[in-house]
Image: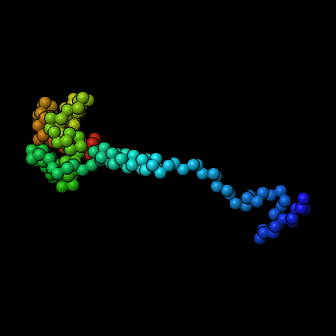
Amino acid sequence: MPPLSPPRSTRLGPRPLDHPPHAGRPIAAPSAPRRPARTRRGLRLAAAALVVGLGVAGAGCLAPAPAGPPPAVAAAIQNAFGDLGPGVVSCMTDVAYRESRWDPAARNPSGASGLFQLLLPLHDDLFYALGVPPSAWPDPHWNALAARELYNGAGIAPWGRC
């Protein structure tokens, strides 16, 4: 058996005999076995489909409204919010689309009703403040004016944001 050679010198000095050669730098952990290309391709396609699906499903949450509401709905929103400027009119048009898809007769099992999904009987006072009974909620004109009353008191907060 040949005798052990003396330790090599480095810039930091000689390395001790009991010092392992890799202690000066970290060693990467062994990598996991690679998946077959077909599996990776399938996963990429599934991930792409999921992203597209989330984009379509998630976009409905705060996405801007499509082309435009029916004329009666557009006139009601313009009449109720027009004095606040075109930005607020656009915002509230988007809110009405998000809440009811511009259907003045839209109803939710929780009691939310109309274009802006006002909660009845909680928001009955909004209609009384306008001088009409809460049963007027399906009329886009009165529903938009009641939404304006709510907007005057709470801003956009009841509907989230634009």
Q: Relative to 158, is 32 on the left or the right?
A: right
Whether residue 78 is visible: yes
Residue in view at x 39 percent, y 49 percent: 45
Image vertical order of residue 6 relative to residue 93, above or below: below
Counting from the top left corner in percent of width and height, residue 95 is at 23, 45
Q: Relative to 99, is 145 on the left or the right?
A: left
Q: How many marks?
A: 0
Residue in view at x 16 percent, y 39 percent: 103
Q: Relative to 45, is 144 on the left or the right?
A: left
Observer-nearest residue: 44 or 120? 44
Counting from the top left corner in percent of width and height, residue 87 is at 21, 55
Observer-nearest residue: 159 or 60? 60
The answer to which quarter of the image holds residue 19 is: bottom right
The colour scheme used to paint the residues is: rainbow
Q: Classify the position of the N terminus by image quarter.
A: bottom right
Counting from the top left corner in percent of width and height, residue 23 is at 74, 58
Counting from the top left corner in percent of width and height, residue 137 is at 14, 34
Residue in view at x 68 percent, y 57 percent: 26
Image vertical order of residue 63 relative to residue 4, above or below: above
Residue in view at x 83 percent, y 56 percent: 18
Observer-nearest residue: 35 or 146? 35
Whether residue 130 is visible: no
